[in-house]
Image (tube, helix red, strand yellow):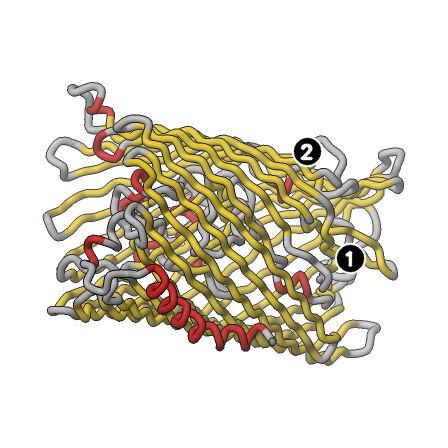
Amino acid sequence: MPLRAYIHFLPVCFIACAAMAEERLGLDESASPSTTVNKVQRVEVLGHKDDRRSSTATKTVILEADIVRYGDSSLVDVLKRVPGISVRGVQGKGGQVRMRGLGSGYTQVMLNGERAPPGFSLDSISPELIERIEVARAATADASTQAIAGSINIILKRKVDMSRRDIKLAASSDGGEPGIAVDGLLSDRDSGFSYTISGGIGRSKSVDVSHVDQEERNTEAVLSLARLTQKRDFGQSDRLNLAPRLMWDLGHGNSINLESLLRFQHSEGGGEELRLTGLGEPPPLVRDFTRSVSDSSQFRSKLSVLHQLASGAKLDLKLGVTYNRREAESQLEGFDVKDLPALSRNITSLASDYGFSLSGKYMHAYVEGHSFVIGWEGEYNWRAEDKLRQETASGRPSIYRDDSYTAKVERLAVFAQDEWEILPQWSLYMGLRWEEIATQSEGNTMDEVSNRSSVLSPILQTLWKLAEKDQLRFALSRTYKAPNTRDLIPRRNVANDNSSTTPDTKGNPNLRPELAWGVDLAFEHYLEKGGVLSASIYARQIDDVILPSLMKINGKWVSQPFNQGRALLHGAELEAKFNVKQYWSDAPALDLRANVAANWSEVESIAGPDNRLDQQTPISANFGVDYKLPGDALTLGGNYNFQSAATTRLSNTQTAINPAKRTLDLYGVWKINSAMQLRISFANILAEDHIAESTYADRNGIRQQTTTSQSEMTARAVLEMRL
């Protein structure tokens, strides 16, 4: 039976199983819901401030006050201050979010407790739309276990305590380029109906300047190539966000929720490159200009129905749809060493993603002290992409190529979990999840490619409350990393300047998922007013690690991924957060935050030293302080972030070097009155350049490429009003 048929058949099976479970367990139809369901707090978080302390599942919760503290316009900039998280890339220009120093799919991103849909980007979510962020370092069975490093769960605003009318007016400057934004929140409650509508519009501009140094030396270290490429890119982006949520409380534990997320973005940009060759043959294109225009739209909606059975058990059903569309056009005009037209290229592309999901949970405290959940998830995603390339090159026939392909991804999961309060001081979480993913791709220039893989993930977590303020956590979990869909498609993507450091890329349809066993151990000491001191260690063993292999085919360099053995990683994290007045009554009102994470890894198929996985960040650290002046009218604060340098052997011939990164952010909040305040922030004050270096070395010599990208300080002012 095909996977899609299973997805369609599951709702009937699920409801039947729930009914059978009630009958077999002999549940009392007259039992009060309050005496059964709430005996034990389940792993599913509800957003209270004590989530981290009371939940058996280990996690960190970042609340709204911390999310908006620095007035960030990007969620990526918020996450860089979270313990154990680092961001790779140019400061203020987005970047790759990494837990345990790992990105590239090792870190799972979720939206409202579910894996983010295809095409989702952290940069697409404005911090003003978010209620809280949950960072889970160990897996749970009711969420996808594609989380070897951990999960970041973004919860959009949904809680309605009172009628609110909030508006935020923001103006910013990024390296002298202006930006504006207006964000708002509207919420209210009327009897059993409540709603929250948050959204915003904004425009931002950017100018990015970088240069690339390339050198080649033979086996005698004699220089044979020296080239400098100067780049200047500019862009403008307009965005519209809207996140409505409607909630109906039907009474007797029954409710209906409809939550949606819409985003529209229009971007225009361009750039120019100049390649200066001091030694060696000049490239085919010495100078080129690019222009691009793109329009993207995202839509996600989820309907949730919660039904409380007469026995006190709960049935939670969810139906979701997603839609992403991106239409883009780019033009390139290139000139040769004599400044004559050498290449004219026009590319028009259209990519669309459609998704459908259906899931359910049956929840019941069937025995006192237990909270039992069984459930299933079915998901179907379809992607279609068309790319039309028209190219005219000097001395070559014109090219007119129309490439199109479709990709289907089907996912099915079933799970069961039980949180057991063995003693008031000791709770145990046990979970089991089976998940299968099937992909199928085909196109007019490629054969049909199919891939299917499944993973069984047992999970155990436990919490010991050693004393009133001290507790110890332990977790054992089986997680995995599925190959990216694009890495399964054997289509070749051609680089403009093919070399050993800038090769063509090609997918591999035979990739298997990476499988990992992991353990986590943490000690936590809680202080007054939300303070905490914690220390944790972790270890992972990953089999079938996916690594790129570089080869030369018909005179062209090509990089293709393959499963290549085992990787071992481990690390430690320390965190401290407290108010100075707790220990010194005459001290100023200072809140201090500090955290540091150290990570090590070893890929067995690559010779050491520095054979770490995924260019893992070895050390990341934050130190932050908030000072509330007497009178509570003015609050000042800042955060210093550090990421250590890393040299990584990507293969036995390739090496990547990332230098240390330091950022300093400052902010101030002036409370004008009870309904208005002004927030001013300065991000990336140090404005350090971002440097990335890659080398290729074999018996014929060495090629080295160093890219230096300028970064700029960003200033932002936000006027926040409650109407």
Q: Is residue 300 left or right of residue 282?
A: left
Horizontally, residue 279 falls left or right of residue 425, namely right
Residue identifier under label 1: 558
Q: Residue at x 13, y 31 (%)?
A: 630
Q: Position of residue 296 (x, y in %)?
A: 47, 71
Q: Residue beneath label 2, please?
A: 610
Q: Which image quarter is the C terminus in?
A: bottom left
Alpha carbon separation for disc pair 2 and 1: 24 Å
Q: Amino acid at mark 1?
A: Val
Secondary-structure class at tag 2: loop
Asked whether the viewer can see residue 691, the reply is: yes
Q: Residue at x 76, y 63 (%)?
A: 336
Of mark 2 and mark 1, the one earlier in the sequence is 1
Quarter-of-image position of residue 341: bottom right
Judging from the image, what secondary structure is the residue with disc 1 in? strand
Left or right: 72 with respect to 477? Answer: left
Name the mark nearer the viewer: 2 or 1: 2
- On the image, the x and y values in percent for residue 154 come to 38, 55
Q: How many marks?
A: 2
Foreground pick, 513 / 194: 513
**Front in this rendered view, residue 477 or 106:** 477
Which is nearer the eye, 684 or 403? 403
Is the residue marked by circle 2 packed among few (<14), some (14-19), or many (20+) residues within 10 Å? many
Q: Can you tell which quarter of the image residue 171 is in?
A: bottom left
Q: Amino acid at mark 2?
A: Asp
Residue 504 vs residue 207: left or right?
Answer: right
* Residue 625 found in image quarter: top left
